[in-house]
Image (cartoon, rainbow, N blue to C red):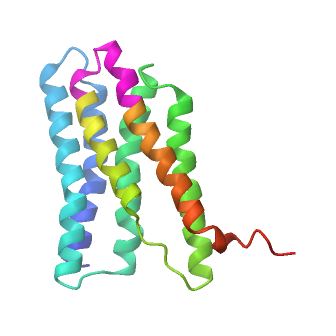
Amino acid sequence: MTTASKITMIRVVMIPAFMLAFLLSPGQPWLKWLSLALFIISSLTDFVDGHIARKYNQVSDFGKFLDPLADKLLVISAMCIFCQWGLMPAWALMIVLAREFAVTGLRLIAVQKGRVIAAGWSGKVKTFSTMVALCVWIVFHEWAWLNWVIILVIVLPTLYSGVEYFIQNRDVLDLKKK
């Protein structure tokens, strides 16, 4: 297993620790700060493992599979907690999940046709804005007015990047085929 993949595995292992700390954080301020630290460290490992994989030629099929999965699990785990606490509406989480499933499906179809769909800028902006928004929300989730701002910061780039992936790669779906 490469160093980059080991870092990705650390991120996967940190997700349950983050969830436990965050779920137990109401009434325990130190756990809120611990969960924030775990979320930030986990988020940063996404950039570190990618950098190491490219710089040291450690790109592997395992890493290509696990890295995006780990990102999605981290983000979705936080959003599920916010849903459980009644702070994030289920429709907003469903938009995020639907986009992730749809883009993954599009990529699978593209791979079957010998084409790789690389992450676009809008997808990177979506990932960054979502992770930053979730960090802010972990700390300030008691501020009701902020909840809707955070939801918009998550949902709008998610919708935009999802639509952009399909527009730019619509030929992969062969919609005009009879």
Q: x and y percent of residue 112 in the render?
A: 61, 81
Q: Residue at x 47, y 53 (%)?
A: 161
Would you say residue 150 sits in the magenta stretch?
Answer: yes
Q: Report the label total.
A: 0
| Residue situated in front as seen by the camera: 10 or 146 | 146
* Quadrant assignment for the N terminus: bottom left
Q: Residue at x 27, y 53 (%)?
A: 13
Q: Height in image: 29 above or below 106?
A: above
Q: x and y percent of residue 166 in the render?
A: 59, 61
Which residues, given as a range, are shown in magenta? Answer: 138-151
Q: x and y percent of residue 24 in the render?
A: 27, 25
Q: Residue at x 41, y 52 (%)?
A: 72
* Quadrant assignment for the C terminus: bottom right
Q: Height in image: 118 above or below 145?
A: below
| Residue situated in front as seen by the camera: 134 or 145 | 145
Relative to 172, is 89 on the left or the right? left
Q: Height in image: 168 above or below 84?
A: below
Image-quadrant location for residue 35: top left
Q: Residue at x 34, y 57 (%)?
A: 124
Q: x and y percent of residue 66 in the render?
A: 38, 66
Would you say residue 152 sits in the magenta stretch?
Answer: no
Image-quadrant location for residue 144: top left
The main secondary structure of the magenta stretch is helix
Q: Height in image: 29 above or below 126?
A: above
Image-quadrant location for residue 142: top left
| Residue situated in front as seen by the camera: 109 or 177 | 177
